[in-house]
Image (spheres, rainbow, N blue to C red):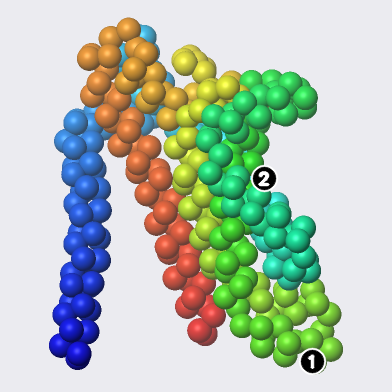
Amino acid sequence: MMRMRTLTQFFGFFFLRTCALFVVLILALLLGHIWQKGSGSLSWEFLSAAPRQGMTAGGIFPAILGTLCVTCIAAVLGMPLGIGCAIYLNEYAADTALTRVIRISIRNLSGVPSIVYGLFGVVLFVQLFKFGTSILSAGCTLGLMTLPWTITASEEALKNVPMAYREGALALGATKWQAIRTNVLPYALGGMITGTILSLSRVAGETAPILFTGAAFFLPELPKSVFDQFMALPYHLYIMSTQHHAVAKVRPLAYGTALVLIGLILALNLAAIILRARLRTMKKE
């Protein structure tokens, strides 16, 4: 019997390690291929100049700037709303049928196709709020996309804080909000912010939502306000790879754009890892 358990455990761990190695191998092959095809396009001009000559020369700086702008707007909109909603659902809302339906609806929103968010953004921000096809409309649409992931990650982080932390503060005469602010949030903040950053790294690579709400094929000048159209890395990559009049000629530039976009997303993920490690160190001190 003991031998059978040992064998089962061995094959179980072997299967898990094989799956993990397979995933890492696929990722390495993908990144290696993109690096091989796109590293030759990387230069200071490529990162700091605007595209020219029908996007067959120049750089992608307007697309980088546009991507950063809409991601920042998404963060400003999504972080407070998502974290606030998670705090209410976990700390204040009673466990009723209504709150369970709300939680299920939030989980379901995570699986809604991004193009549906894009169409909703057109109706709400472009037409109803009259923001027009602009940086603001695209950023707000991406902010809505981050909400389900931000709420879910933040609520899970709050659930991991022991109930004794809340009860101890309440027993000493603290109000409910004081107990949450001083005894709960400091321990959940790492997971909450990490989840938010990861959701932002996801929406930074989305094309469909910004396609309808503000992204432009080509702009010779940088946007002057949040109500202007903009270029973005995902849409720029889509155009260069599929819609350009000289796809074969600009393919190295497309690979370079993909490399920059992946680098931006990896930087956001790395920031999440560093932030979580820093917050854990602060809690121990």
So how many labels did they put on this image? Answer: 2
Mark 1 lies on residue: 171
Find numbered disc 2 in the image and state the secondary structure of the residue it sits on.
Answer: helix
Name the amino acid type tagged 2: Leu
Question: Quick one: which residue is furthest to the front in this view?
Answer: 1
Residue placed most toward the observer, 7 or 168: 7
Q: Is residue 69 visible?
A: no
The residue that disc 2 covers is 77
Which percent across, then down, holds residue 13? 22, 72
- How far apart marks 2 and 1 lie (CA) works out to 35 Å
Query: Which quadrant of the figure has residue 50?
Result: top left
Residue at the spot 30% in from the left edge and 37% down from the top edge:
259
Provide residue 144's location: percent of width, then percent of height: 64, 41
Q: Amino acid at mark 1?
A: Ala
Residue shown at 72%/74% (left/top)?
181
Secondary structure beneath label 1 = helix
Location of residue 42 (image quadrant): top left
The image quadrant that residue 171 belongs to is: bottom right
Q: Is residue 136 above or below residue 146?
A: above
Q: Is residue 42 above or below residue 238?
A: below
Left or right: 109 as drawn, with respect to 257: right
